[in-house]
Amino acid sequence: MEKNQTMVTEFILLGFSLGPRMHLFLFGLFSLLYVLILLGNGVILGLISLDSRLHTPMYSFLSHLAIVDMAYACSTVPQMLLNLLSPAKPVSFAGCITQTFLFLSFAHTECLLLVVMSCDRYVAICHPLRYSVLVSWRVCISLVVTSWTCGSLLALVHVGLLLRLPFCGPHEINHFFCEILSVLKLACADTRLNQAVIFSACVYILLGPLGLVLLSYARILAAILRIQSGEGRRKAFSTCSSHLCVVGLFFGSAIVMYMAPKSRHPEEQQKILFLFYSLFNPMLNPLIYSLRNKEVKGALRRTLFKESHF
């Protein structure tokens, strides 16, 4: 019986149930988006590290968001691209569990970083005179370290509970990467504890942070309404609305995936929702949070101007 329970040493990712031509089209499309993710977030990291004017807590948070987005995409997209070219290619058990851990770790960290960034903007707009005191470099480093640590520890809890389960039966994962709920379906044991921990973690890592983000932006919007300048009010509204769209897309799709009744969301629909995590959200973040920013645009112009003179 013990031998049967430890038989599964690899999994097969079924990916997308489409024809070869569609697989090639998706491979080209996803490859392009993947390059844009790495390029966009890489440019942000480069500008923040090269331009001393961007060496502030706010841009430190943005640089860590860029790192998370790049790592997030790198943990899922290459496997998805490989699967589109070679369907049903096996993945080792250790490799699958590692991918699950990395995906969860980066996802949790991004949730916490988005909260930290919203609170940073709230202090900057609503308490500008106290900003340097409330958001010092010491506070900035503490918040970033806490975000990474909590994200990794929570992912470790999920993976630890996953590893206690025996996998003795089917080894086909109906997904394009080793997503935890899809892996749990293959376990040859009761997974109710895992499901309960996942739901509880969602309350902590999704609903709690989302509430804090919405509260921060509600106070920011209240402060914006007191701005006398119509132009300044329009710019502030534009920035806040774009930030809220990205936050809503990220948290909304996660809540639908992990907290809504599963019967309402077929597996193919779940795969599409996960594309928002792996591709669309990491691609949108540098555009919304950084490249629309006047200081980042100025840093980009200064960098390009310097290079044109060499």
Image (cartoon, grey):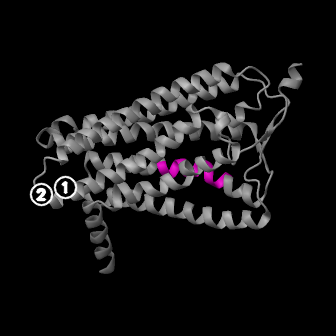
Contact? badges 1 and 2 (CB < 8 Å): yes
Residue that lies at the very extreme toward the bottom in this rendered image: 309
Residue 12 or 262: which is nearer the viewer? 262
Amino acid type assigned to the residue bearing label 1 in the image = Arg
Amino acid type assigned to the residue bearing label 2 in the image = Ser
Question: Which corner quadrant of the image does residue 85 belong to?
Answer: bottom right
Q: Is residue 78 magenta?
A: yes
Residue range in magenta is 69-79
Which residue does the numbered mark 1 point to in the structure image? 233
Residue that lies at the very extreme toward the front in this rendered image: 264
For marks 1 and 2, give the CA distance. 6 Å
Q: Is residue 105 visible?
A: no
Label 1: how many Cα within 10 Å (few below 14, some 14–19, many 20+):
some
Which residue does the numbered mark 2 point to in the structure image? 229
Regarding mark 1 in the picture, which secondary structure is present there? helix
Residue 175 pos. (x, y %): 71, 45
